[in-house]
Image (spheres, helix red, strand yellow):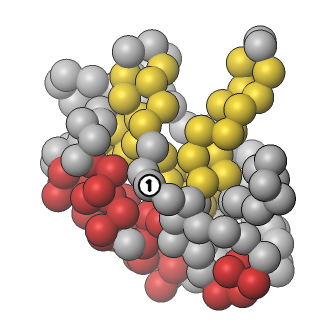
């Protein structure tokens, strides 16, 4: 996303019938990203149907301080879009990041991540899913492309696949 002043951000956009708007700029840049992009300045919350969603982009989800600062805004769920490379080590990292965010802050954690080939990876570990506030995975996709997971969240433990 390019700001009016020319700075570029890796960002989360909210898309509605009225158009698209930037709602969050990635704070924790990784690797060569800082050669081109400007880090976002602060955590952000997107309110959808009364639920407060704390936003994370990729490496943000690997930084415990990001989850803490975002949770301090009074969120219902920590929502991350990420990419993890292939293999069991990456799957363990991915699950650890999301489980820790949920358990440490007592919130739902929701992950949308690439599956199949993506970027420089011939394959990725996939694993999009939803973690309960106790840190357990409620529903989770595998590494194959094309999977969709869902769960009704809030209050009691959700029912996987409910919508």
Residue at left offset 44%, top offset 64%: 61
Depicted 10 relative to depicted 54: above or below: below
- Residue 20 sits in which quadrant? top right
Depicted 69 relative to depicted 50: above or below: below
Q: Which residue is mark 1?
A: 42
Residue at left offset 24%, top offset 36%: 74
- Residue 57 sits in which quadrant? bottom right
Residue 125 visible to an observer of this rendering? no
Residue 111 appears at what percent x and percent y?
Answer: 50, 50
Residue 148 appears at what percent x and percent y?
Answer: 63, 38
Q: 103 or 18, which is in the foreground?
A: 18
Figure disc tally: 1
Is 89 on the left or on the right of 142, as rendered? left
Q: 77 or 9, which is in the foreground?
A: 9
Q: Dot 1 lies on which element?
A: loop
Pointer 1: residues within 10 angstroms few (<14), some, or many (20+)? few
Residue 116 appears at what percent x and percent y?
Answer: 76, 64
Q: 11 or 154, which is in the foreground?
A: 11
Residue at left offset 42%, top offset 72%: 62
Residue 14 visible to an observer of this rendering? yes
Residue at left offset 44%, top offset 55%: 42
Instruction: Name, please, the residue furthest toward the front.
Output: 5
- Residue 108 sits in which quadrant? top left
Is 11 on the left or on the right of 106, as rendered? right
Q: 158 or 26, which is in the foreground?
A: 26
Residue 156 appears at what percent x and percent y?
Answer: 18, 24
């Amino acid at each position: 996303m390019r700001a009016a002043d020319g700075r570029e951000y890796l960002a989360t956009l909210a898309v509605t019938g009225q158009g698209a708007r930037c709602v969050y700029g990635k704070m924790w840049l990784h690797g060569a990203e800082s050669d081109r992009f400007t880090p976002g300045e602060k955590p952000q919350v997107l309110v959808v149907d009364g639920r407060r969603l704390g936003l994370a982009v990729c490496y943000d989800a690997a930084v415990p301080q990001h989850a803490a600062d975002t949770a301090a805004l009074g969120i219902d769920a920590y929502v991350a879009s990420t990419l993890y490379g292939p293999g069991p080590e990456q799957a363990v990292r991915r699950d650890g990041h999301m489980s820790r965010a949920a358990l440490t802050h007592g919130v739902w954690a929701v992950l949308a991540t690439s599956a199949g080939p993506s970027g420089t990876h011939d394959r990725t570990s996939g694993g999009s899913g939803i973690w309960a506030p106790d840190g357990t995975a409620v529903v989770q996709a595998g590494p194959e492309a094309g999977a969709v997971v869902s769960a009704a969240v809030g209050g009691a433990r959700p029912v996987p696949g409910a919508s």
